[in-house]
Image (cartoon, rainbow, N blue to C red):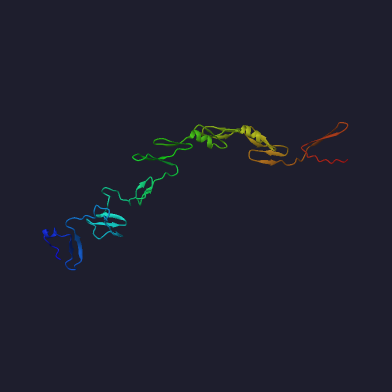
Amino acid sequence: MSNSAKKSDIRKKDFYIIRDEKSQNIVTVVFPNGIQVGLNEPDFNSGIVLSNLSTPPASTTNSLYAVGGTVYFDGTPLGAGGGGAPVNAQYLTLALNGTLTQERLLVAGNGLALTDGGAGGNATLAVGAGSYITVAADTVAVNLSTLTPAIAGDGLTGTGSTLAVGAGTDITVATNTVGVDRSTLATAFAGYGLADGGSTLNVGAGNGISVAANSVAVLPEPTSGTIAASSTGTSVIVEATNLILAMQIFS
């Protein structure tokens, strides 16, 4: 069959087959007077069946075809630029929909709150307020007036929005310093062998012990001295000067 024909002849044909002149393979089938699928009657099948292809055809220009369950025309999914939206787009939704195949569900994570204003309204995602947290239009803040007393542990005080080191017995606190009151601490700590020197705690000097700035020494035994004795009638009193007196008492 020739690929050329008179227009008057074409008008009289139900369809017109165009073949490759060499191989006689059918290139396309033309319906010159349009196509109506089915009748407006319930007893007739009015649908068009398209093969579900795995890949688009070699030429998609002005072609109607289906790939992966989506109908395309001229290389574009039907509805993408017209009356409907594609069902396989990656939409962000507030609820899952059985028709959509690639939607993503928006949920509020930890520390966030999602408020749905309904159809035609806003879906608002905001930082969630809670204990010790205040949220305003453009700010998120910690409420220190309630937080500081709650977290003030031993040795700390919480007043209003200030967390400070607490002063106490023998402890002084100034703007940038914490100190120990040595004038009372030395007295409290001066035990055996120590002497209270006001704000200084010293090793106490005594018989046979000498104390200098950076040394403590044992004095040598004396080599000379005197002994004096006196009697009260019932007892004898012996006094030694610069001597170590050794006595043995017999009963």
Does any portion of residue 92 appear in the rendered image?
yes
* Residue, far bottom: 23
Image location (x, y in percent) of residue 234: 88, 32
Please state if 212 lies on the left or on the right of 110 as rendered. Answer: right
Of residues 166 and 188, which is closer to you in this image? 166
Residue 190, quarter of picture: top right
Residue beneath the point at 17% across and 63% down: 18
Answer above or below: position of 33 versus 223.
below
| Quadrant of the image occupied by residue 195 | top right
Q: How many marks?
A: 0
Tell me, yes or no, if residue 176 can be seen here: no
Task: Return the x and y of residue 163 as percentages of the image width and height.
Answer: 52, 35
Residue depicted at x 48% and y 34%: 144
Q: Is 54 or 242 nearer to us in this picture?
A: 54
Pick the front one: 207 or 45:
45
Quarter of the C terminus within the rendering: top right
Q: Quick one: quadrant of the N terminus? A: bottom left
223, above or below 25, in the image: above
Give left or right: position of 56 versus 204. left
Q: Residue at x 20, y 64 (%)?
A: 26
Using residue 35 as the reference point, say whether residue 195 is left or right of it. right
Give the image location of residue 3, x and y in percent: 14, 63
Q: Position of residue 4 (x, y in %)?
A: 13, 62
